[in-house]
Amino acid sequence: AEPKAEPKAEPKAEAEPKEGDAAAVREPVKLGDPSLTAGVPGDGPITLEQIDAWLAEPKNFVELEPILPLGLSQGAAQITGLDENPLTRAKVELGRQLYFDPRLSLDSKVSCATCHDPSMGYSARTKTGVGIDGQEGGRNSPVAYNRILSGPQFWDGRVDSLEAQAVGPIANPIEMGFTHEGVVKRLGENAVYRQQFEKIFGELTIDRVGQAIAAFERVLVTAPSPYDYNEQLRTFDGLDEEDIADDPDLAAKHAETVAFLEKNPMSESAKRGRDIFFTEKGNCTACHVGANLADEKYHNLGVGMTKEKPDLGRFVVTKDPKDTGAFKTPTIRNVALTAPYMHDGSQGTLEEVVEWYDKGGHPNPHLSDKIRPLNLTAQDKADLVEFMKACTGPTPTVETSRLPE
């Protein structure tokens, strides 16, 4: 008898793209690339047809390998969260939609961007956050950029990830005033959102909402500032023109640096301020260190400690008396755009902030040992302010209005 023919295998249906399909091929991408935050192609509300076309593109599911811009690039080793929550264009785009969508709040009037507005330096002009029904919170709105270099979040570091931070305000009664169950149900009733969560994550849960928003926030970074290019120019000190010209890469780098500073000069006042900032004279680097000019630690500056019931800050999280009234160090990058300042928004200008540090904060039993009177001159103070202004760089162009229909 002739051997039986082996049954032919049924052809496998071509799998739809999902996160991780292209994990073997990682796409290096410079953070700040406007294509990451440009939104789904098209005009008006995002339709199901448009999102289906977007999700059918395999490139949108390729894992991204982020490259930090000049200045921040020195902190590449600080990048956090990508092992647990890899970046893809599809995920970043979903997070962008969620970030700007007020439907994440109970009354559909408050979004993440309400307190972290791109036009306001990813913060807000109010002393404290303002949520549903105009309710005022107790703390100033922290910035949403350069979070890719930050682990614990909020002024008191009460959550250990950007993902956890992203969903916290949704259920806060004085912020977005909703519930996690309620927002998941609302998103699930929207076909455009439902399709994205299914194709990107395979499910719609509050944890996935947090992952998407965190992915979007991680691509929000500050571009190089006059300070960064001035630091780069300093690396050429000691080299003559021939040394530079003999190395094509070095010559190109030098030309780029000079060209930038010609259009965006760092003033002599700012340069003096830089020297104050980075020396014992200003003592600023006791806390403002690293690529993001923030140590990611918590310090008591005496802010608000004279109140009858002061905000106890980090102590509420750790119960350690040394953390009483201590709050997380904010970044100096783009600080000129994010007034008012301090955890309670009590300082309206950078000049006021410098005065606060100059006098050594406000005495209290828990004052940080890093805070001391500086005895700066009026010119020193003005120079420090100019230096902080020179730490300002553009943030990516972001589509803010295109949301699911």
Image (tube, rainbow, N blue to C red):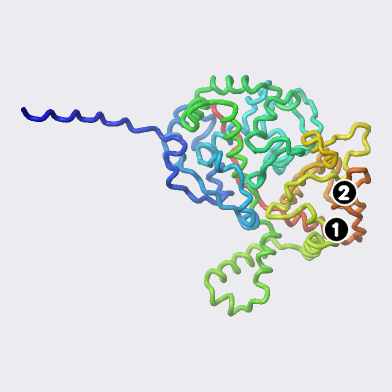
Q: Is residue 393 above or below residue 136?
A: below
Q: Residue at x 79, y 64 (%)?
A: 275
Mark yes or no: residue 79 visible.
yes
- Identify residue type, mark 1: Ala
Specify the quadrant that holds the N terminus: top left
Q: Is residue 332 left or right of residue 21?
A: right
Q: Which structural element holds mark 1? A: helix
Residue 171's x, y, as percent? 69, 25
The residue at which mark 1 appears reads as 382
Distance in Å between CA atoms under marks 1 and 2: 11 Å
Mark yes or no: residue 124 visible.
no
Q: Which structural element holds mark 2? A: helix
Q: Are marks 1 and 2 in contact (CB under 8 Å)?
A: no
Front residue of this view, candidates 398 and 29: 29
| Disc on res. 31 | none
Residue 398's x, y, as percent? 60, 41
Front residue of this view, candidates 185 and 314: 314
- Which mark sits nearer the N-terminus, 1 or 2? 2
Q: Is residue 284 left or right of residue 233?
A: right
| Quarter location, residue 106 | top right
| Quarter location, residue 325 | top right
| Disc on res. 352 | 2
Q: Residue at x 71, y 42 (%)?
A: 143
Q: Residue at x 56, y 76 (%)?
A: 245
Characterize the local packing of mark 2: few (<14), some (14-19) or many (20 or more) Cα atoms within 10 angstroms. Answer: some
